[in-house]
Amino acid sequence: MGEVYKINIAGCERELPICPLNEHMDIAGFVMFSDVEITERAAQALLAKCPEHAVIVPAGRQGIPLAYAMARIG
């Protein structure tokens, strides 16, 4: 495997692949889809910090599983 970026999200350790954007910039690629452990733990961690609410609206389609988990747990 190539170069990776190590990250801890809500207690879950992951190694993200480094993806070049151009000759001057790289990013660490992260996709939450299908990572149930991170989705569940992130939902719990966000709910612990979130004020009382009636609606959760994700910013994009990748946020739908997280918003669903937050709604289900909360």
Image (cartoon, grey):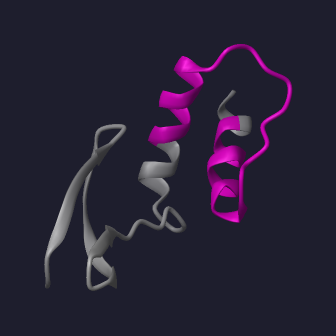
Image point (54%, 19%), residue name: 49
Main structural element of the magenta stretch: helix, strand or loop?
Answer: helix
Would residue 54 appear left or right of 48 to someone viewing this image?
right
Q: Residue 63's quadrant in the figure?
A: bottom right
Q: Position of residue 5 (x, y in %)?
A: 20, 62
Q: How many marks?
A: 0
Q: Which residues are magenta?
A: 41-70
| Above or below for 28 versus 42 | below
Q: Residue at x 18, y 70 (%)?
A: 4
Residue situated in front as seen by the camera: 22 or 18: 22
Foreground of the two, 61 or 73? 61
Measured as percent of width and height from the top left, residue 29 is found at 38, 70
Q: Residue at coordinates 14% horizontally, 83% vertically from top-left?
A: 2
Q: Residue 55 is drawn in which quadrant?
A: top right
Q: Is residue 71 left or right of residue 8?
A: right
Residue 12 is covered by the magenta coloring:
no
Instruction: Tell which residue pokes out farthest to the right in this image.
Output: 54
Please tell me which residue lies in front, 38 or 17: 17
